[in-house]
Amino acid sequence: MAEVGRTFLAPSTPAGHSGIATVRVSGPSCPRIYREIFYSEPVHRLASCRDYRDLSGEIVDRVLVTFFTGPKSFTGDDVLEISCHGNPLIVERIVTDLIDRGCLPADPGEFTRRAFWNGKLDLSQAEAVADLIHARSWAALRCARRQLSGALGHILSGVREDLLSILAAMESAIDFSDEGLSEPKWEEFRGTVLLLRKKILSLAETFRNRSAIERGVGVVLVGAPNGGKSSLLNALLGRERALVSPTAGTTRDFLEEPIRLGPWLIRIIDTAGISESASELDLLSMERSREKLTEAELIFWVVDGSQKLGNAEKIGKDLTGRTGAILLNKRDLPQKITQSHSAFRALGWPVWEVSAKISEDSGRIRDLLQKLLEEKRILPDGEDLAVNFRQMALLREAAEALERAEKLLRENFVRAECVTEELNCANKTLAAVVGEGVSEKVLDRIFSTFCIGK
Ligand SMILES: Nc1nc2c(ncn2[C@@H]2O[C@H](COP(=O)(O)OP(=O)(O)OP(=O)(O)O)[C@@H](O)[C@H]2O)c(=O)[nH]1
Ligand SMILES: [Mg+2]
């Protein structure tokens, strides 16, 4: 049988020395290549240990080879997975040999793109494959897994079914009203459109989860100089990352470090102390502190409990309306400030009495932080979705079309064709989320961000 179409290959494991490495091949030439190299007939899903002989007949390595007959494979085409010893020389030899046998090197994401093309995955699932590979926390992995299972596509197909049934109901109502039977139930249609819009918008809002789980949640340490911000950063990291000294104004530039907290990724940011000082350098570093303060999801106001609050009270005022906690630091020393200080009450944040010098306090702060993140719902729980930017933009566009439809349905004389047009527009936009009607250019952009071999 003629081999029609492209057969491509790529190492699916990273370059370098490792226990094993895998080279993946997909396309119509796979059965021929299998027979040529291993002198036997490929059997679906049968993994067998064989000598890999190159075109010159030399044994390159003893490998484990698995054959998948399309469409029962990842890409939907015939697939060969060759696991060899993880030496780059062996991988290179196998890759060049496969190219000599007519395979082409794969583009980034080509295996997944092929799976999408063959209908094995919708586009939101294909995007989740890359998310799964790049996730840096358990929370991110959970979201990616949920999306890979097709959760978004599933919810959207429900929404689209509802949209189509309103469209059908509208059309038959209009037909009947032409015959003078009854007035279409515009109000009922409007109610459903409103509900669907709400559902779509709440999906779009899950984009917020994405930056939190992908980049990590920003937790910024702010406060007057010498409060112990850098000492607390070091305590939370468990290593001496930041310079600490009894001189006020030790930290100039901000420092940002990732920590894992349960399933979450957190970015702890240490900043320069905020004071009345007017030196140019102080002003520059304080400007940076304020920038970080604006960006962060959560604020730790670090206060030295062994000193009077004094001018530092002003910092609290700037924090009004934000989310955070007060870290009343240096509890190992005699205290001059209590938890019930009026500046703390005004802010309404929890006050944690801590010390950077007491080793068990870093664990306590981590526990309290995790509780605060959960309580304030700054992070999605495991069941949540986190749509990406492309999906969010499309969901918003669909919601806008529904908003226009809803307005039209409120008019005294409802222009049914205009409503239908908006509903169709929403349906088409939602279809694009799962990849229907998406241009090759958009697909190129999406898959170009993938790894080679995925
Ligand atoms: N006794 C005691 N000393 C502390 C504690 N935390 C910090 N210090 C000391 O307080 C001084 C200032 O600590 P830093 O961590 O540099 O304070 P900072 O808030 O980063 O200061 P700036 O960078 O200048 O804004 C240092 O001498 C620390 O050793 C604490 O919990 N107890
Ligand atoms: Mg510091």
Image (cartoon, rainbow, N blue to C red):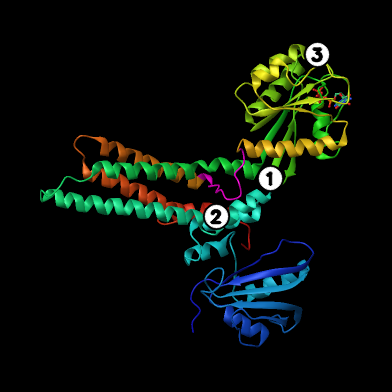
- Compared with 361, 384 (above or below) is below
- Compared with 13, 416 (above or below) is above
**Where does residue 91 sit, x and y in percent of width and height?**
73, 69
Residue 354: quadrant of the picture = top right
Q: Amino acid at mark 3?
A: Lys
Q: Amino acid at mark 1?
A: Trp
Which one is in front in this view, the residue at disc 1 or the one at disc 3? 3
Q: Earlier in the sequence, mark 3 or mark 2?
A: 2
Magenta residue span: 378-389
Residue 238: quadrant of the picture = top right
Answer yes or no: is residue 8 visible.
yes
Q: Which residue is mark 1?
A: 264
Q: Amino acid at mark 2?
A: Gln
Q: Earlier in the sequence, mark 1 or mark 2?
A: 2
For label 3, the SS is loop
Q: Which residue is mark 3?
A: 308
Dot 1: within a 10 Å radius of its alpha carbon, few (fewer than 14), some, or many (20 or more) residues?
many
**Where does residue 161 sit, x and y in percent of width and height?**
36, 55
Question: Residue 17 lies in magenta, yes or no?
Answer: no
Task: Residue at 61%, 62% (x, y): give it.
Answer: 454
Q: Which residue is mark 2?
A: 147
| View quadrant of ligand 2 | top right
**Where does residue 182 sit, x and y in percent of width and height?**
15, 47
For label 1, the SS is strand
